[in-house]
Amino acid sequence: MAYDGKIMRRAMQRYDEDRQRRREDFRRREAAVYEREPQLRDIQRQLNATMSRIITCALRQGTDPRPAVERLKEENLSLQSRRRTLLASMGLPADYLEEKPACPLCRDTGYQGEAVCRCLRSYYAKEQQKELSRMLDLGSQSFETFSLDWYSALPDSRVGTSPRANMEYNRDVCVDYAYDFNPRSGNLLLTGQPGLGKTFLSACIARVVSEKGYSVVYDTAGHVFERFEVRKFSREEDSRAAEDVDRILQCDLLILDDLGTEMTTAFVQSALYEIVNTRLLAGKSTIISTNLGVTELNQRYLQQVSSRIEGEYQVLIFFGEDIRRKKRELR
């Protein structure tokens, strides 16, 4: 699983903030208990000093440390017993003064060995959702709210099926793609006129895949190509364009929206080839959404690009009436 560095930094910041908040809450709780029963502070201080006293005994030359260590052990058990008794008299559980990690798997480090722990992955998923929400309406765009009722059930003589039946197929493909996603799930090309649900279904996929903790980058083709251009021509040493390009090329799932609305310059041709080819070679999954048909893609872009898309992408064709327009007319 590839993690987006920018998103992970935000996740780590929230993770550390929550960890510090829990620590501060524990300190306040601890101080309140000590104020009610000062003996508990003295007991805790003696318990905290046990380890240093054991080490001192072990380092003392010329004596057998075991009897002293045994006495310290007995003292420690006695102190724990007194602490439990005092806490019980205050109506508090025996472990009330024990600072426990929120995650027992990693003990609040965020990592199990070199692997990211599931607790930190949950923070990553939340930050991923926030990032995607800047461009997508994840609050209302979901497979559950996707309705086929907007699409005509009358067959289209040109294709031999109805817009509704076609959209049911497209939806089912997208549902399977999202819920069965892994970084090598393959690629989709969503093609058709505006207002037919391409962006909606892309948002649904982004929502599900990001909730599973995978890194997802959703952006318009025009903005993506602009970041490639800044990376190449900017002289600013602190430019973030290089990081943005790395995110585009390395994320688990790239959703490139509105391909074909940009000015198709030689630079754009080169950037699109780099995106498509690099991600194919790395086995990374990509979804491209475009108002252009397959024939128009072949005419507009380099043969090296269009042949890779045609050969390596599952094509989902969208047709019918403009849904956005129909919704506006009913308002």
Image: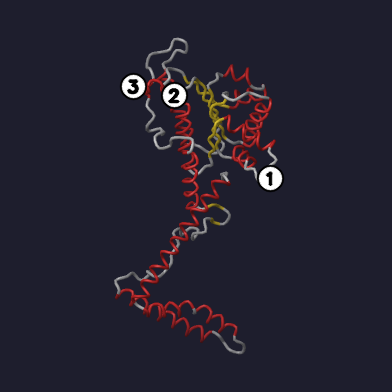
Asked whether 166 or 255 is in front, the reply is 255
Vertical arrangement, residue 144 with respect to residue 107, above or below: above
Question: In the image, what residue occupies the spot 60% across and 27% down?
Answer: 312
Return the residue at label 3.
330
Q: Earlier in the sequence, mark 1 or mark 3?
A: 1
Q: Amino acid at mark 2?
A: Tyr
Which quadrant would the N terminus be assigned to in this image? top right
Task: Judge depth for marks 3 and 2 and give the one in front.
Answer: 3
Q: Position of residue 101 (x, y in %)?
A: 45, 62
Mark 2: secondary structure: helix
Query: Which image quadrant for residue 324?
Result: top left
Q: Earlier in the sequence, mark 3 or mark 2?
A: 2
Q: Position of residue 230 (x, y in %)?
A: 65, 36
Q: Position of residue 224 (x, y in %)?
A: 59, 33
Question: In the image, what residue occupies the spot 37% across and 77% down?
Answer: 83
User: Disc 1 to disc 3, how far (Cα)?
Assistant: 52 Å
**Outermost bottom residue:** 62
Mark 3: secondary structure: loop
Return the residue at label 1.
237
Asked whether 54 or 21 is in front, the reply is 21
Which quadrant would the C terminus be assigned to in this image? top left
Query: Which image quadrant for residue 32?
Result: bottom left
How many neighbours does mark 1 have within 10 angstroms: few (below 14), some (14-19), or many (20 or more)? few
Task: Judge depth for marks 1 and 3 and give the one in front.
Answer: 1
Q: Amino acid at mark 1?
A: Glu
Q: According to the image, what is the colour scheme of the structure?
A: secondary structure
In the rendered structure, the answer to whether residue 6 lies left or right of residue 178 reads right
Asked whether 223 or 71 is in front, the reply is 223
Q: Amino acid at mark 3?
A: Leu
How many neighbours does mark 3 have within 10 angstroms: few (below 14), some (14-19), or many (20 or more)? few
Return the residue at label 2.
169
Q: Position of residue 112 (x, y in %)?
A: 54, 56
